[in-house]
Image (cartoon, rainbow, N blue to C red):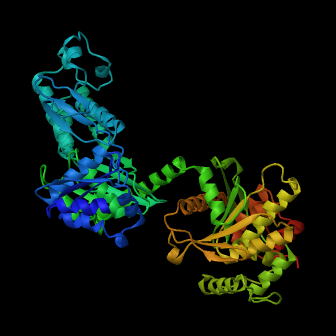
């Protein structure tokens, strides 16, 4: 601060750029200001600085300034210096690769169509930028199929004596050997220009007219060739999976922030077509918000790149009007907009989701799994390294096709070979039936249990009675009632069954815990109720040395505000930007994904099954006879034993077996 106070004597009240240098003369920070003196003076008041800025000021050994005429010019200079000097306290856009373009050459009777990267100082027309070499290559292939333009070099063109393979596969008109005249080639060239400039519909209509003329004149070979060209154009338009009508030339920039990192996705739209996308991961301080990171990104991204007329953003920028003015200094007017509704808002949201997925992949690949595991152990107060974490979740629709899922993670990431799913069978233990009876209003059990099972069951029963679309079925025997009182409609009972099966089997197969199949930590997707359920199961099985934690979403089920439940400890939350929190979220989401997938598979299999398949001794012929007589399995379930006996091929013994299956034998 003493260095900055001394430098303030020579700092003017003008717009410009300042550079903070360390003792080695390297820039630690580059900033711009409308009033340099006022901005630098702010750094001399320690009380108003964050820890990051205090560290930055403490490393400053010298200050350099550059005065500019306007604040917009200062912004452009700041972005240029940041990219060139890479100060460690700035947001840094490290991926600075140039974008490829499509170049249609000039000064030749038969201009070449080619990919181009570099300074656009060659004669001809440039179209782009494209997000990647793959995007430009796909477009080039389409242009070759649709417009038959040559892609060979001039030297190769002048030395050919017969058509090349591209002519044989209908991707070139072979002007090198005179298969097409100059005027006809010029027409193809004009059509290609129109397509790249967004007039693809007009080009297709003109080609359709030409195809009809050729067919009317019985030139079917020419008509077929034009038909293939139209198909090529239709194919590339059909692959425009991310597109919004009305967007001609625009960039869409969306950011997502999690785990102290930010992903910025940039999609390019030119001539009404999607020309690809690229993900960026700027380096920045974890405490910076997404708006600040996106502001720095936009300034640096367009420092030496062509700018479209419209840039759609997922978040408002800091000093957005100033950045808009600065981007408009070197060319035409640039509009920065944050859509609030309509198709453009949906497009931005979709690209923001793409940024979220890309960031998830990046964190999964780049973060040290061991560091994250150690961070989890520290957060939950566990001793020793964590080598195996198991995460549990359930999935069902109103109790139907209920599935429990277990995923496993270790130092190398997810251990997918250890994933397990549990088809929920139902409750078979007396104490569970007693608890269910209490929850459904019967005798026995305490409905006021602290884990909320009684209230949850009563509420579920009330809702079921209010929302049932049909009258109550006839009285059922105890077996039928027990099947309906299964674990499928109760998350606590489902969790209880999953843990009994998982750890009961572990105690039987690996009691000495020598195979590495026992977890160091169990994560449960749920809150205090699920935690009490697991506590009861572990106490019942005599397991005392397996740590388990419940992870529940916070208020309004917002990610980032999760609460964690541990036995004997009040619930707590982690910092929203903590990488450990993001790691736990990913584990929870992976368990959720796996559980939903298993449930959908079971549900799809159940669609093709009939309740009659569950009855022992009922083969395909008897099942077919019952269905032909009654029309459906539901009608069979409602039938009396006398009606079932009258079905052809059904004896009294079989009829009683069918009746008992649906109505019980009591």
Q: How many marks?
A: 0
- Give the quadrant of residue 136: top left
Residue 162 picture location, percent across and down: 25, 11
- Give the quadrant of residue 663: bottom right
Residue 661 visible from this viewpoint: no
Residue at 71% across / 71% down in the picture?
488
Residue 482 vertical position relative to residue 310 in the rendered view, above or below: below
- Give the quadrant of residue 619: bottom right
Of the 4 image quadrants, the one containing the N terminus is: bottom left
Residue at 29% across / 16% down in the picture?
164
Residue at 18% across / 63% down in the picture?
34
Residue 632 vertical position relative to residue 375 in the rendered view, above or below: below
Residue 57 visible from this viewpoint: yes
Residue 415 vertical position relative to residue 578 in the rendered view, above or below: above
Residue at 25% across / 37% down in the picture?
101
Residue 310 picture location, percent across and down: 21, 56
Along the line of sight, the residue nearer the viewer: 77 or 470:
77
Give the side of residue 208 with respect to residue 452, left or right. left
Residue 80 picture location, percent across and down: 24, 47
Along the line of sight, the residue nearer the viewer: 199 or 60:
60
Residue 303 picture location, percent across and down: 23, 48
Of the 4 image quadrants, the one containing the C terminus is: bottom right
Along the line of sight, the residue nearer the viewer: 286 or 556:
286
């Amino acid at each position: 601060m003493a260095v900055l106070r001394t430098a303030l004597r020579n700092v003017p009240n003008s717009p410009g750029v300042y550079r903070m240098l360390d003792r080695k003369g390297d820039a630690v920070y580059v900033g711009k200001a409308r009033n340099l003196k006022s901005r630098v003076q702010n750094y001399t008041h320690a009380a108003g600085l964050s820890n990051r800025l205090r560290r930055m000021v403490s490393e400053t050994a010298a200050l350099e300034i550059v005065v500019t005429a306007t604040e917009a010019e200062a912004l452009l200079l700041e972005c240029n210096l940041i990219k060139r000097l890479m100060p460690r306290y700035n947001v840094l856009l490290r991926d600075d690769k140039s974008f490829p373009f499509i170049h249609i050459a000039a000064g030749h009777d038969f201009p070449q169509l080619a990919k181009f990267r570099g300074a656009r100082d060659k004669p001809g027309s440039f179209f782009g930028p494209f997000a990647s070499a793959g995007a430009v290559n796909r477009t080039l292939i389409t242009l070759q199929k649709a417009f038959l333009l040559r892609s060979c070099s001039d030297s190769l063109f002048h030395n050919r004596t017969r058509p090349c393979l591209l002519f044989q596969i209908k991707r070139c008109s072979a002007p090198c050997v005179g298969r097409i005249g100059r005027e006809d080639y010029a027409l193809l060239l004009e059509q290609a220009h129109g397509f790249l400039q967004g007039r693809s519909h007009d080009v297709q209509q003109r080609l359709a007219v030409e195809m009809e003329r050729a067919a009317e004149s019985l030139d079917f070979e020419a008509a077929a060739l034009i038909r293939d060209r139209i198909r090529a154009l239709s194919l590339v338009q059909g692959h425009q999976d991310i597109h919004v009508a009305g967007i001609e030339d625009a960039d869409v920039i969306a950011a997502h922030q999690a785990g102290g990192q930010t992903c910025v996705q940039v999609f390019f739209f030119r001539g009404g077509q999607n020309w690809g996308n690229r993900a960026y991961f700027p380096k920045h301080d974890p405490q910076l918000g997404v708006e600040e990171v996106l502001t720095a990104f936009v300034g640096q991204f367009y420092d030496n790149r062509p700018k479209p007329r419209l840039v759609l953003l997922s978040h408002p920028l800091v000093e957005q009007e100033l950045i808009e003015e600065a981007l408009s200094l070197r060319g035409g007017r640039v509009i920065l907009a944050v859509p609030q509704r309509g198709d453009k808002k949906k497009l931005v949201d979709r690209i923001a989701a793409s940024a979220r997925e890309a960031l998830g992949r990046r964190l999964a690949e780049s973060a040290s799994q061991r560091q994250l595991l150690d961070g989890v152990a520290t957060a939950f107060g566990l001793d020793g390294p964590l080598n195996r974490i198991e995460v549990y979740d359930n999935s069902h629709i109103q109790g139907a096709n209920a599935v429990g899922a277990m995923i496993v993670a270790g130092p190398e990431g997810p251990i997918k070979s250890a994933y397990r799913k549990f088809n929920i069978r139902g409750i078979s233990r007396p104490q569970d039936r007693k608890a269910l009876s209490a929850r459904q209003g019967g005798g026995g059990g305490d409905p006021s249990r602290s884990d909320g099972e009684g209230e949850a069951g009563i509420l579920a029963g009330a809702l079921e009675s209010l929302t049932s679309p049909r009258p109550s079925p006839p009285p059922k025997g105890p077996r039928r009632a027990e099947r309906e009182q299964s674990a499928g409609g109760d998350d606590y009972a489902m969790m209880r069954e999953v843990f009994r099966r998982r750890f009961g089997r572990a105690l039987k197969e690996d009691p000495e815990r020598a195979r590495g199949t026992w977890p160091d930590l169990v994560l449960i997707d749920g809150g205090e109720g699920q935690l009490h359920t697991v506590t009861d199961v572990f106490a019942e099985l005599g397991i005392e040395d397996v740590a388990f934690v419940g992870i529940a979403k916070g208020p309004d089920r917002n990610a980032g505000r999760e609460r964690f439940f541990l036995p004997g400890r009040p619930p707590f939350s982690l910092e929203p930007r903590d990488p450990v929190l993001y790691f736990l979220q990913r584990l929870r989401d992976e368990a959720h994904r796996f559980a939903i997938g298993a449930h959908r598979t079971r549900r799809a299999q159940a669609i093709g099954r009939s309740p009659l398949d569950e009855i022992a001794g009922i083969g395909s012929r008897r099942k077919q006879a019952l269905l032909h007589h009654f029309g459906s399995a539901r009608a069979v379930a409602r039938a009396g034993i006398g009606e079932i006996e009258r079905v052809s091929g059904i004896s009294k013994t079989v009829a009683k077996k069918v009746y008992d299956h649906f109505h019980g034998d009591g």
